[in-house]
Image (cartoon, helix red, strand yellow):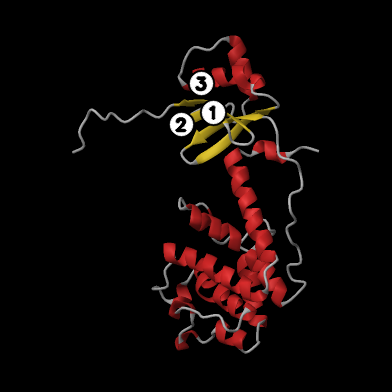
């Protein structure tokens, strides 16, 4: 069976492993611990913006309804003693306060609302935010693929059977080998995997030559067809060969170094 970890860079795999550990820890918490973890992640998104509650509540997006009403109410379902911020409590003109219902033990309307909202693609902007804490919080709260969602686990704890799936530890041995990694800004893309660094050397040199717009030999042109991005223009900022544990074996940067001889204006 194909090991899809070969398609993920060491950086991405490390992020995935950290996410898995966080979700596994959440799954093992008692309801009070889950409540606190939900509110912590939720407030990470709220405090970072750009989702703000100043607009009229009846014009809120799905993201805002989830952040300012549904998740706080979900936290109250898990721990009726949870303390909410003022912004997480409905105003009288809203007509429905899901947190008040939760404290009264009435959860059906809240759960129906959550099911409707998570059926759509929420927290998309937050999940790709340049702030890593914001991105991690968004992915922890909601998984686009249905598994590893703290919201789903919490709903299932309150009303078992709605989201019964749970993530399990990854018991596979560590991935071995090496990868050519093309880095674009903060994004790493795996161009090629091999069992050894030596298998990647000629391909790496051909890709560097292509990026530098050098004339290629026929053999180099043929080699480049083994890159995942072929025939797309190779415009990466950095090209490296990395061991699967993240050790950098070879690296070439194409970002101009700043000229410190020119004084800042």
Q: Residue at x 75, y 56 (%)?
A: 168
Q: Are marks 1 and 2 in contact (CB under 8 Å)?
A: no
Q: Are marks 3 and 1 in contact (CB under 8 Å)?
A: no
Mark 3 or 1, which is nearer the eye? Answer: 1
Residue indicated by mark 3? 208
Q: Position of residue 137 (x, y in %)?
A: 54, 60
Q: Quadrant of the C terminus?
A: top left
Q: Position of residue 221 (x, y in %)?
A: 59, 16
Q: Residue furthest top?
A: 217
Label placed on residue 237: 2
Rounded to the nearest angstrom, the CA distance separating label 3 from label 1 is: 10 Å
Residue 52, compared with residue 189, is above or below; it is below
| In this rendering, position of residue 227 left or right of residue 57 | right
Pointer 3 local density, CA inside 10 Å: few below 14, some 14–19, many at least 20: many
Label 2 SS = loop
Total numbered badges shown on the rendered structure: 3
Q: Position of residue 95 (x, y in %)?
A: 51, 87
Going from N to C along the chain, the mark reached first, 2 or 3, is: 3
Rounded to the nearest angstrom, the CA distance separating label 1 from label 2 is: 10 Å
Q: Quadrant of the N terminus?
A: top right
Q: Position of residue 88 (x, y in %)?
A: 48, 77
Q: Residue at x 63, y 18 (%)?
A: 223
Which corner quadrant of the image does residue 27 belong to? Answer: bottom right
Going from N to C along the chain, the mark reached first, 3 or 1, is: 3
């Amino acid at each position: 069976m194909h090991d899809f970890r070969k398609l993920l860079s060491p950086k991405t795999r490390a992020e995935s492993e950290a996410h898995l550990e966080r979700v596994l820890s959440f799954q093992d918490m008692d309801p009070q611990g889950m409540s606190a973890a939900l509110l912590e992640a939720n407030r990470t998104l709220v405090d970072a913006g750009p989702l703000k509650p100043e607009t009229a509540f009846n014009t809120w997006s799905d993201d805002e309804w989830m952040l300012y009403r549904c998740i706080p109410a979900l936290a109250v379902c898990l721990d009726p003693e949870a303390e909410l911020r003022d912004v997480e409590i409905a105003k009288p003109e809203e007509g429905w306060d899901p947190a008040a219902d939760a404290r009264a033990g009435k959860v059906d309307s809240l759960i129906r609302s959550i099911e409707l909202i998570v059926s759509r693609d929420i927290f998309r902007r937050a999940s790709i935010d340049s702030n890593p804490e914001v991105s991690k919080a968004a992915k922890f709260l909601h998984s686009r693929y249905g598994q590893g969602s703290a919201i789903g686990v919490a709903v299932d704890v309150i009303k078992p059977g709605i989201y019964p799936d749970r993530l399990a530890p990854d018991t596979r041995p560590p991935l071995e080998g090496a990868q050519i990694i093309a880095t674009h800004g903060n994004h790493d893309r795996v161009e090629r995997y091999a069992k050894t660094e030596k298998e990647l050397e000629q391909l790496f040199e051909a890709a560097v030559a292509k990026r530098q717009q050098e004339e290629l030999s026929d053999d180099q042109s043929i080699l480049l067809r083994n890159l995942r991005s072929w025939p797309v223009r190779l415009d990466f900022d950095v090209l490296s060969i990395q061991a699967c544990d993240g050790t950098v074996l070879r690296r070439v940067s194409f970002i101009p170094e700043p000229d410190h001889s020119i004084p800042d204006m």
